[in-house]
Image: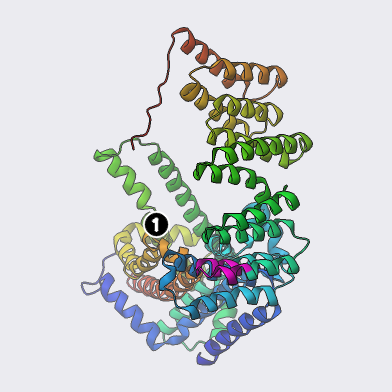
Amino acid sequence: MQNKPNLTPVSLFKAAINTYLSNPIILLPLILLTFIQLLILELLYFYPRYPLLIIFKPIVTRIWGEMYLHYPFNFALLPELFSRLQVIIYVLVGAFLNAVTVEIIAAVNSDRKITFSSALRKTLGRYVHILVYAALSIGSLIGLSKIYGLLIQRAMKIGSETGILAAIKNTIIYGAPGAELLIGIIVTTLLAFTLPLIIVERRNIFSALAQNFRYILRSFIFVFLLVLLPTIIYGLILLLRSPFMAPISQTIPSFQIFVLISSILLTIFIDATVLTATTMYYLHIKENK
Amino acid sequence: MKRSILTFIGILVGVYVIFNLIDSRSEYVAEKIIWDTNQKLAKAARNPEAIPDNVYAQYAAQYSKVIKQFGRTSLAPRAAILLGDVYLIKKDNTTARKYFQEIFKLYPENKEILAEAAMSIGKSFEFENNWGEAEKYYEKILADYPTTAIGLNVPLYLVNHYRAVKNAEATAVATERAIKMYKNMAAHNATTPLGIKALNNLTNLYIALERWTDAVDTMGSILIKYPMRNTAPIMIKGINQISLMYLSDSTKAVAIYEDFIKKHPKHPLNDPLKKMIDSFNTLKSQNVKIKVEEKKP
């Protein structure tokens, strides 16, 4: 396909922000998702205390050790516990609410009247396809992260302390958070049109994936930049998680909560922008086909 | 949408308040108070004179809160010790001793904490250069709480004290008593962790006194009596180091390892031990000696 001369990732990024700011209904599913995540995080915050301790004590003791039931060690485990639960939340609810967002964006784009409940009802019929998409998306993310983990293990075996080999080793090891972010961006790019195809064209997951790859093959760089632009802001969270911030975590254990909450809140902006921009771009491709 | 957001915020705040109310007297809350106050106290200890009295009073109030409000938790006795420590850091030894003495009334059954309180009272007298009074409390620990973690270290502590003040006669008496106590304790508690702890302290005592042969013998008996995965490698490392660096003679080490292999024929460490025996024999046949350089003043 050929892009219009005035359609650039930056212009689409700006248009996406303007669209959801002038149609706040687009944000409602993502706000609901944020609420669910914050509620789960809040419950996890209370895991070393009664009554949640009854459920968590045997699990935490068996997997991580008894010390993580005590202050301040519970804060060291909190990000790990939350990220595990986040995977489940994403597969069961997150991807579905993203799909509801796509449904609303498509309606807004075609000037159709839509309410949150009607979008929810309409999307519910596509749940199985969305569930498979979510599992595939999260599976790719975990799989690629595991491969990067193997790369880190290999890099650790490099004995050199100077020269090119040492530079490669340090880049792989210390660049891990950035690499994880890049993996996320690539997976999001590769599957960018799958949800719009499932929701707008009512395709099944396999047909949607096939068509998605056909579109992506022709516009990979454009979509990659579209996903990259809003995601850059996540660098702030990487900075908060970096070893430079370790002294703060050590003196203020609850700093971990602040980092997690910031990450959840920032994700609304990223998800809203990426979903709106990619859906708008998909609709643009569809119109110009 | 505003209503939805307000509802979500309301639910989050409500859940937070409810969970805090349900569990406001638990061990976790006490842990948090103690940890936060410990952090502040550790900072204060770096420059105790610069800290105003009211700040010390605030730290003391936090520990007192744990003792009163969380009395049923296992952290209350710990808070009682820390309350005394606040005044030790403040260099108000009289008040510190008052709080340590209270522990004897508050927790008469908790021998570990009582030994710790007695030790802290002893230390407070040492800060005032009053060894006579301090020693009374150390003797009390030896008489009343000899098998506690603190009690087990007191014989060694006394030997080190007399050596530091260069009192040869008292050092000899304290050493003889410590060796007798540790050996007795090890013999009577061979099947409990106390047995191995007593032998470990005996080893440390011999090392402090530079009685290398006795140290190797004691480590050898720990290795043979307690061939567990967590202790055996440490003992082997110690035996090797002392044999090579201080004794310049591996005969004892070889004898210990041969005895170990004989008594534990299926032990996973036997192969490495056999290699060590071969290495020691090679070093002996080539008359290799390792010389330890004395530290320059």
Q: Which residue reaches farthest top? A: B285
Q: Specify the quadrant that holds the C terminus of chain B.
A: top left
Characterize the magenta stretch by its predominant secondary structure: helix
- Across and down, in percent, residue B239 comes to 56, 26
Task: Please state if A51 lies on the left or on the right of A107 as rendered.
Answer: right
Could you say which is closer to the camera, residue A35 or residue A80? A80
Q: How many marks on residues?
A: 1
Looking at the image, what colour scheme do you see? rainbow
Q: Quadrant of residue A1?
A: bottom left
Residue A238 visible in rendering: yes
> Label 1: which residue?
A177
Residue A25 drawn above or below residue B41: below
- Magenta span has B95? yes
Q: Amino acid at mark 1?
A: Pro
Residue A79 drawn above or below residue B188: below
Task: Please state if A106 lies on the left or on the right of B81 as rendered.
Answer: left
Could you say which is closer to the camera, residue A229 or residue B154? B154
- Magenta span has A50? no
Residue B230 visible in rendering: no
Label 1: chain letter: A
- Across and down, in percent, residue B209 comes to 54, 34
Q: Mark 1: which secondary structure?
A: helix
- Across and down, in percent, residue A269 comes to 41, 76
Q: Which residues are magenta?
A: B83-97
| Residue at x-position 31% and y-position 75% | A13
Q: Quadrant of residue B116?
A: bottom right
Could you say which is closer to the camera, residue B271 or residue B246? B246
Task: Please state if A73 lies on the left or on the right of A197 as rendered.
Answer: right
Could you say which is closer to the camera, residue A179 or residue A109? A179
- Across and down, in percent, residue A215 comes to 37, 61
